[in-house]
Structures are given as C-alpha cells and as structure tokens.
Image: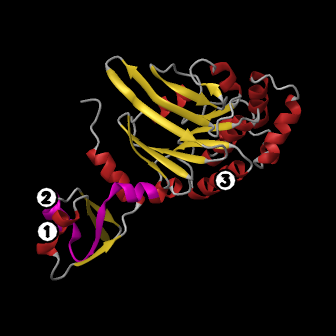
Amino acid sequence: MSASEFAIDVRSVTKKFDDRTVVNDIAMQVRPGEIYGFLGPNGSGKTTFLRMLCGLLTPDGGSGQCLGFDFRRDTPEIKKRVGYMTQRFSFYEDLTIEENLGFIAKLYEIPERKTAVEKSLERLGMVERRRQLAGTLSGGWKQRLALSACLIHEPQLLLLDEPTAGVDPKARRDFWEEIHKLAADGLTVLITTHYMDEAVRCHRLAYIAYGNLLARGSVDEVVKTANLTTWEVTGPELPVLAEKIRGQPGVEQVVAFGTTLHVSGRDAAQLRESVSPWMTGAYRWQQIESGLEDVFISLMETARDNFS
C-alpha cells in the first residue's frame, strides 16, 4: 500500500450518463479514522460517487487512491477492504439474522465463518435475536443487521449511503454512537445524510449539488466560507411577512424555523436595506450566526439543476 496520509485521495472524478454529467470533476481527501459527511439533495451524485469509489461503477475521468490502491485499476483489492451499506435493505427477509450474516461471510470467503458471525452478533447486540427472520425486524434492527454485514470482513473503509433514513431517533443516536466508536478504532467512514444534526457529528463535510462540489471542510469552515448573513425574526403573522420580503433584493431565503423566520443573504448591506421597512413595529429582528442548515439551503437554491 501507498504511504499516503489519506484513506481516500481522489481528484477530477467524473461520471456521465448519456449527455448528463452526474459527478463533475470532484476531488476528495479523507483521513484514516475520519467520519466524513457527504451531503446534498436527492439526485446530486452522492450515491454515484460512492459506487465509483468501491468499484461498482467505472468513472469516466479522474485519478487517485482509495486505501492506497488506484481507485480505477485496483478495484478488486479495494472491494475486499470496503464495507458498503446501501440505502435500501438488501438482505434475505426469509432468512434469520444469523443466516444472513453467514451468507455474507461466505461471499467474502472468510476462513472462520462461524467465529466471524458470532463476533458480528455480539458487536451490535444481536445475539438474542439471531434466529429472528430479517423480514420481521424493525427499521432500527434492520439497520443493525446491515451494519454488521458491512463489518463482518473487518474493512478499513465504510461507505454508508443514507443509513439512518426511516429509523427512529433512538436508533439513529445508537447508530452514531457505534460509528464514532468504530472511527476511534481507526475505521474510516464516508457517510451520506440529509439530517443536519448528523452532519454536525462528522469531522468534516462536503456538499455536492447536481454533480458539483460546492463546499467542504469542518462545520465551522463551511459556515464561514458561505459568508451568509442571517436574521432571526419573531412577531405576529410571520407567513404574511415572509411573502412580503421573499424575493426582495439581497434576500436569498426566507425559512420558517419553529415560531421564527430565518432571513438570509450573502450581501449583508443589501439584505438589511431591503428588510429595513419591516424592522420596526411588532417584529423583532436579531442578527444571528448562520447555521449549517441555513448554509445548505442557500447552496441548494443557488445551484443549477443539471437536468436543465
């Protein structure tokens, strides 16, 4: 393996389907033991990028390494060292948890399959449910089974594609606790998510929209680089106010947050000038630090759809 300091170190990664570019000249560097969040709207190219990294899709362009191997030439070696958890539950529902794990262990040609299955059952607390049919599991337990299957061959890199979609808050929290334990032990994790509370639990982030990389860095770096000014507004009939100020010069977004509005824009002076007529009277305006969600909504609304 290469002595590269990065578990993932790729550049100019590109993929086209017909005339549409779904991943456009993307570069990414992820350190060993890092939890790297990959965010963006549906159809932005996240899943396509993950599939290229682990050799399930062939890129049209790009170079670099994944786990020290050339990510275009050495896909068989990379596949052996990667655990990939897809968006959809993809295990045999008429087999038990134990039988599903045994089948996966056989696919990976693990020498001591029974030992590997037992370790997987113990790792995520599934010993007592080992004989339960996969099809009868709740969303949270299906998630545990999928994660266990990803880990059974002791991979160096986990690729997780929206792994917490459709599970309850406790299952999501337990899942993230496990991910942080794995990362602390040196496992590298690249995870796609739509949840902002999950994004802030990542060490670093990248935001992609319609195939283009728009932002990357730590949460603080992403927020700072966006240079977004945000006002929090409280008062009566906020939906009426929102309609009045939406579309004004400098007003890029007006979003309801509970009993308040967040009004944001990149041109601070123009934004304030446009909303100043409503800054008196019953409304209370307070400038606040832009949050990650404010930034991502702004990025999404300013990105150009590659279907057009």
Secondary structure type for disc 1: helix
Report whether residue 283 is seen.
yes
Q: Residue 224: within the magenta?
A: yes
The residues colored magenta run: 221-247
Secondary structure type for disc 2: loop
The amino acid type, in three-letter code, at marker 1 is Glu
The residue identified by callout 3 is: 180
Which coloring applies here?
Answer: secondary structure
Disc 1 crowd rating (10 Å Cα; few below 14, some 14-19, many 20+) is few
Residue 249 image label? 2
Report whether residue 293 is seen.
no
Secondary structure type for disc 3: helix
The amino acid type, in three-letter code, at marker 2 is Pro
The extreme front residue here reads 3
- Left or right of 41: which side holds 77? right
Question: Residue 203 placed where, x, y %?
Answer: 57, 53
- At 72% from the left and 35% from the top, the residue drawn is 155
Q: Residue 228: within the magenta?
A: yes
Gap in Å between the C-alphas at discs 2 and 3?
Answer: 43 Å
Disc 3 crowd rating (10 Å Cα; few below 14, some 14-19, many 20+) is some
The amino acid type, in three-letter code, at marker 3 is His
Residue 273 image label? 1
Of mark 1 and mark 3, the one earlier in the sequence is: 3
- At 81% from the left and 47% from the top, the residue drawn is 128
Relative to 303, is 180 above or below? below
Marks 2/1 in contact by CB < 8 Å: the verdict is yes
Question: Residue 39 placed where, x, y %?
Answer: 45, 45
Question: Residue 17 placed where, x, y %?
Answer: 38, 20
Gap in Å between the C-alphas at discs 2 and 1?
Answer: 9 Å
- At 87% from the left and 25% from the top, the residue drawn is 111
Give the foreground label among 1 and 3. 1
